[in-house]
Amino acid sequence: MPSSPLVRHSLHESLVAPLREMILQGELRAGEKVPEEQLCERFGVSRTPIREALKVLAAEGVLQILPHRGAIVSRITEEQIDELFPIMASLERLAGLLACERASDADIARVRTLHERMMVHFQNGEEVEYLRHNRLVHEAHFEIAGNVTLSAFYQQILTRIHACRFVVRKSREHWAAAVAEHEKMMAALEARDGPRLAALLEGHVTGTTSGIARAFINRLNEQQPSPAPSDRMGARAGTRGRKTQSSLSV
């Protein structure tokens, strides 16, 4: 009998997924340096496969590798919100349409269970567990939709905006708004109302979720220390130098 070909994965390839998950769960946070030594101990490997895995994540835009400083988790920008959140919204819209078409009673019961657990965590002010169940609810739409390519695109975009989706702390106002929208989304799924669920998901991402992301960026900017006077002078001098160079090259 012909045997199936063996699929072999290199060590660094097997490390990419758990490292990506650490970022998605907020274990490695935006702007933080990746602790290579701790990761080596955690996974029982040398630095070489860790660094190769980090290069893969850097190519995805999740990390930045800085000369002589190692890797840091990328921070999302306003430009990335403008670019990526509409894509995310479109993917969620399609997932909602497909989920309503294909959901079994058991699928809907499973999402209802996740939703109720999420609501309990909201009522108890348990934000970490709330965010985890929030992510599970959204991912359930894609699982029920049953489109592997759609799910892969979703995970790719989700990884890019990790810091602003299911990790960042919300204001009480944003949190309450998100919960109210989830109640409506759950009702639409149970009614198998595809167009309504699609519209709610799209509005949720482009509205409330986008607002949370922008507020997160503003908080990060406020936390940035002001440059020392000498740094500001150096920055102005550098700007003047660049202007002079630009004018000479015209």
Image: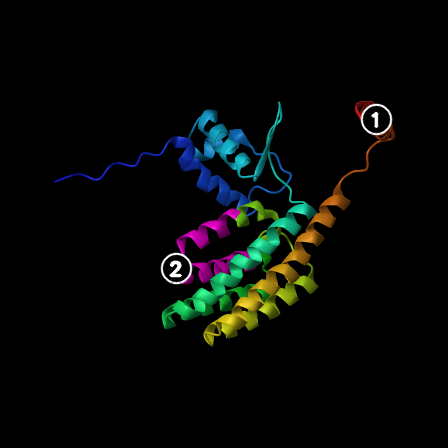
What residue lies at 66% left-to-right and 51% top-to-bottom?
82
> Which circle marks residue 202 in the picture?
none
Between 118 and 94, the residue placed more toward the observer is 94
Mark 2 element type: loop
Amino acid of disc 2 = Gly
**What residue range appears in magenta?**
128-156
Q: Tell me if I can see residue 124 in this picture.
A: no
Q: Tell me if I can see residue 228 in this picture.
A: yes
Give residue 128's position: percent from left, percent from top: 57, 55
Give residue 76's position: percent from left, percent from top: 64, 44
In three-dimensional space, the C-alpha distance between marks 1 and 2, rounded to whole angstroms, equals 56 Å
Q: Is residue 54 left or right of residue 173?
A: left
Give residue 179's position: percent from left, percent from top: 60, 67
Q: Mark 1 sits on what residue?
A: 247
Mark 1 element type: helix
Of pointers 1 and 2, the one earlier in the residue sequence:
2
Q: Quadrant of the C terminus?
A: top right
Quarter holding residue 224: top right
Q: Mark 2 sits on what residue?
A: 146
Q: Is residue 104 left or right of residue 192?
A: left
Between 52 and 200, the residue placed more toward the observer is 200
